[in-house]
Amino acid sequence: MAGCASVAPPAAKEPIALDGQASALHGERYLEYRVGVHIAASPETVWTLLTDAPAYPSWNSTVTDIDGTIAQDQQIALKATIDPKRTFKLRVSAYDPQERLVWEDGGKAFRGVRTFTLVAKPDGSTDVTMSEVLTGTMMKMIEPKLPDFRPSMQQFAADLKAAAESRGS
């Protein structure tokens, strides 16, 4: 390993299970939370939910507010129940409609990257995976102070599934 690089564990290369159960993977200066769900709704329906910032609190019990526009290279300010006193200032770094959405914050010392991946299925449904990868030179010091993201990630996925399926295709 060179210098202070973050190293993902081998399990990070494995597909994310679609069982709705969040898991955590630990590596060298690396922590990943991940969850996946199968949603009986179209990618268009799921994408609409994921990219409508003002509507998040109406369907997602883990998000109390998002200010800004969820679009490529835009900045958003997210408030979440996992850390109610903090506003996460995020940049949308990937925006591939109905396929992939990434928002992130931080730098070399500590970086968080959340990735949503949508896969359209032949029956019109969607497989959705979500991962939050935390890396950086300060991970060893910061990680013990972080909350367990698994309950929040799991609830986010469950809320997304329920909201999308209630809207249908």
Image (cartoon, helix red, strand yellow):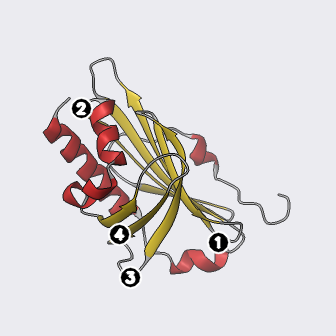
* Quarter of the view holding residue 120: top left
Nearer-N-terminus badge (3/4): 4
Inspect the image, locate mark 4, and give the three-letter code of the amino acid beneath it. Answer: Ala
Q: Quadrant of the C terminus?
A: top left
Q: Residues within 10 Å of mark 2 (few under 14, many from 20)?
A: many
Q: Earlier in the sequence, mark 1 or mark 2?
A: 2
Give the quadrant of the N terminus: bottom right
Q: Amino acid at mark 1?
A: Met
Residue 113 visible (yes or no): no
Q: What residue is pinned by disc 1?
A: 139
Give me the disc on residue 85: 3
Q: Which mark is residue 41?
A: 2
Please identify, in this view, whether the residue under mark 1 or under mark 4 is nearer the observer.
4
Q: Is residue 84 visible?
A: yes
Q: Secondary structure at mark 2?
A: loop
Residue 27 vs residue 151: left or right?
right
Question: First in sequence: mark 4 or mark 2?
Answer: 2
The relative height of residue 164 versus residue 44 in the rendered view (above or below) is below
Placement of 123 over or under 66, stated as above or below: above
What amino acid does circle 2 point to?
A: Ala
Label 1: element kind: helix
- Tell me if mark 3 has few (under 14), some (14-19) or many (20+) residues whose alpha carbon lies within 10 angstroms of its own: few
